Image: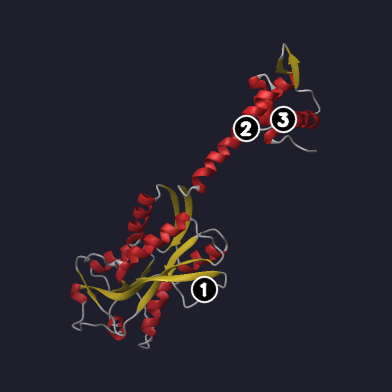
Amino acid sequence: MPSPSLRQLRIFLAAIETGSVTAAARSLNVTQPAASQQLRELERILGARLLVRAGGRVAATSAGEALIGPAGRAQAAVEEAMTAVAAHRAGETGRIRLGTGATACIYLLPEVLAAMKRRMPGLDVIISTGNSEDMLERLEAGDLDIVLATLSPGVGRSLSATRVLVDPLVALLPTAMAPAAAILSPADLAALPLILYEPGGKTRSVIDGWFRQGDIRPRPIMALGSIEAIKMLVGSGLGASVMPQLALPDPVPGTVVRPLAPAVSRDLGYVMRSAKMLDRGLRLFIEELERAAARR
């Protein structure tokens, strides 16, 4: 069964408001015959007479009176829908579902998000944190729009990855525990109590790979998911760690930082579904992310 169209309801309401089909047609920029035809079709669809002439004016029948309220609400709902979408169409509002690791969330994203907010105040950014692999699974499933993560040599065929930062790994040691060597090898660090990232994440995999270059399998006394907790424990003199330089923008009291040999780094970048269309919000995020990374 066909339903009344918005055009028919608008003509009906205009006819009631003006008291004339001709005036209604003029106000809506349609011809009088076209307006009359639309009203006849509306009455046919609803199976009731809606308008009657009385005293030289068009007036609503009892069925027409019953239709005025619903027709007005339908027109208001459509206008509200158009208004709601207009801001998105103009690029003034939007939403990004972002997945990221804790280190980037703490040390890189704040300045990126602040810059985005200045440029696009109506943009909502919903952030999820976790291991890179978990975030990439959610990205492939369509739960996220973009992921900022430590990159692997390859990602899924449905994904594309772009590197924005090469982040060196360094040793963070309690001052009292630091060896005399200016550059530390896997053997140097393996001789100390270690506090490392928990297993399962990409950064921990990079760290384990570095130790393997010295034929060493690290045996940490603690493995934590919080980079801030690791820094505090190292600062308390409980052990040494290997971490991204990005996580050390300021000195940690009671510690020293040493480079590693062989040198090792992680690639930090963003990953998206290959078929993902870039709206204004995503374009701004990528622009500000690349700017922030270039300042590192």
Q: Could you tell me residue 289's position as x and y percent?
A: 38, 62
Question: Looking at the rendering, which quadrant does residue 36 occupy?
Answer: top right
Mark yes or no: residue 110 visible.
yes
- Spatial distance from mark 2 to mark 1, Cα to Cα? 48 Å
Q: In which quarter of the image is residue 294?
A: bottom left
How many marks the image carries: the answer is: 3
The type of residue carrying mark 2 is Gln
Query: Which of labels 2 and 1 is toward the front?
Result: 2
From what the image shows, is residue 71 above or below residue 147? above
The span from disc 2 to disc 3 (Cα, nearest Å) is 17 Å
Disc nearer the start of the sequence (2/1): 2
Q: Which mark is residue 155?
A: 1
Res 69 quadrant in image: top right
Residue labelled with disc 2: 75
- Is the residue marked by circle 2 packed among few (<14), some (14-19), or many (20+) residues within 10 Å? some
Q: Where in the figure is residue 206, as x and y percent of width and height?
A: 40, 77
Q: In this view, does 46 lie above or below 82?
A: above
Q: Which amino acid does label 3 sit on?
A: Ala
Looking at the image, what colour scheme do you see?
secondary structure
Q: Nearer the viewer, mark 3 or mark 1?
A: 3
Local packing at callout 3 (Cα closer than 10 Å; few below 14, some 14-19, many 20+) is: many
Query: Quick one: SS at disc 3?
Result: helix
Q: Which residue lies furthest to the top in this view?
A: 55
> Which residue position holds label 3?
35
Front residue (pair 121, 156): 121
